[in-house]
Amino acid sequence: MSQPSYEYGVARVRVLETRLLSRDRIERMADALSAEEALKILAETSYAPLVAEVGSPYDYEEILVREMKRVRRFIEEISPEPDMIGLFFLKYDFHNLKVILKNKYLGNENDDLALSEMGTIPIDDLKAGLEAEDHKALPEFITDAVKEIEKMFSVRVDPQKIDIVLDRAMYDYIFQICRKKRNSFATQYFKKQADLINLRSLLRVKRLGEDFGFLKELLLPYGELDMSFYADAMEQSYENIISTLEYTPYNKVAAEGIQAFLRSGDLTAFERLMDDYLLEYVREVKHNPFGIEAIVGYLLGKENEIKLIRIIMVGKLNNMPAEKIRERLRDVYV
Amino acid sequence: MEFVQLFVVLGDAASSGLGLSLGQIYAILGAAVAVTLAGLGSVFGVAIAGQSASGVVTEDPDKFGQALLLQALPGTQGIYGLLIGFIIMNKLNIFGGMIDVSPETGLLIFVSALPIAIVGLISAIFQGRVSAAAIGIIAKRPEELGKAITFPVVVETYAVLALLASFLLVNGIPV
């Protein structure tokens, strides 16, 4: 067999899952007296070689970026269907696209720090492809979206449209591949993601006081919740939206997320609940030894772990008290 | 349909004076089917479980013993098939001047080989899948090897029952 099988990849992931940081260790890091000590605790884990190479707690970001790149290479190596697992890295490509295009149209330069190296297309290739005429080197679904933006912007430059067009293009492509591969797990996963993103758009648009016409442009047409739900929701109170969603899988996200949104006015808590919900969904289905589920679960687990370490290190370097860090961790780690 | 044609061809071969009777050909075919199909099942089974085992050992070489044990479980069907094949060969006294059997007896021997041939083929493939899943258990909890082995062994039960049926049938046919 030229490509490794899911049996092989999933078995490797099962072993590596046991090496993800335990809750216990995360808490010990949060309780550490200094950033150096937190890093020492990290050095007792699978991060040991990276910590030894980097050394200084001020370069923690370097450790995290290298670890994420290692995970990315590992997942690529064990995945028998590169275009399937690639869907889970597309968000980084589209993030890069948005940054590059916004730089181009808004005229900010030197924003390369915001670019992610986790995408399926290397940053340099992406930039070169965007500069070349007709963007031939880029995949077709990206070329089409970029051309659409260029055409739109020849009339009027509206940076918001970049997000809308690119998000739509990304999910169009994702569901095209899901359909082609008939992968029910990935279809379900991205359906749920589309629903949650649509709910987030709903909250945003409601707060802006815009009408359904404005929201309609943002909605991704791939979720379980249909257009009539959003049309109704635009007219209803937040309590009514929560009760409408009570018998959907999103009841917890809606109830807790919308209340936190009303309290604080921002969507951080809602977004955390979105991530938790998807992580929980993958956790439920990752027992399949013959599919992509466990590999995706490992990727999400690793992304989550890196988020936690980042919170701890930022907190420690800014001399934040341990309780405060724990409080912020609780926001991420349920 | 093609299977029926095979018997017609075999019948021709027997009557064309190759020195074998039709009964002998049926019986040998039975032995061959038992060994081949059950063996193929085991090939698929251990291959599926073997990929999982390789994955675990790549990351954690200490689990080699446990992974090998689980990989080997779907290998038993091939042995059962060979056992029935061997009993049939023995019955025909194939190693010391074959005895002649009537076409009816030969056909009976052939049919007797079918339980282990068919059940062996299918159960080994599925057992391989269960073993692959069980290797996922020891990847995370090596101390639970006993529980991990239980699940593939449940599949084994039905291969053993098929072996028993084939064994009793072959033994019960008078030659």
Image (cartoon, helix red, strand yellow):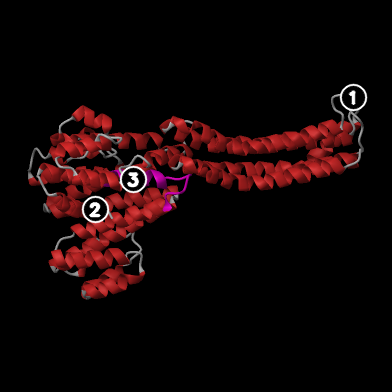
Disc 3 from disc 1: Cα separation: 66 Å
Q: Which residues, given as a range, are shown in magenta?
A: A285-304
Residue A268 picture location, percent across and down: 18, 57
Q: Is residue A288 left or right of residue B47?
A: left
User: Viewer-nearest of labels 2 and 1?
Assistant: 2
| Residue type for callout 3 | Leu
B14 relative to B40 in the view: left or right:
right
Which chain does tag 3 point to?
A
* Residue A286 belongs to magenta span: yes
Dot 3 and dot 1 within a common chain: no
Q: Are marks 3 and 2 on the same chain?
A: yes
On what subunit does the disc labeled 2 rest? Answer: A
Q: Earlier in the sequence, mark 3 or mark 2?
A: 3
Residue position for label 3: A87
**Splitting the image into 4 quarters, where does residue B152 fall?**
top right
Quadrant position of the C terminus of chain B in the picture: top right
Q: Main secondary structure of the magenta part?
A: helix
Image quadrant in which you'd find residue A225: bottom left
- The reply to whether residue A187 is in sight is no
Quarter assignment of residue A250 = bottom left
Q: Is residue A216 magenta?
A: no
- Amino acid identity at mark 1: Gly
Question: Residue B56 in the image: x percent, y percent?
Answer: 45, 35
Residue A94 rendering spot, x and y as whole percentages: 24, 45
Q: CA distance from mark 2 to mark 1?
A: 78 Å
In this rendering, the answer to whether A140 lies above or below A56 is below
Task: Please tell me the numbered disc located at residue A332.
Answer: 2
- Say what secondary structure mark 2 lies in: helix
Q: Circle 1 sits on which residue?
A: B97
Tell me residue B44's x, y (percent).
59, 37
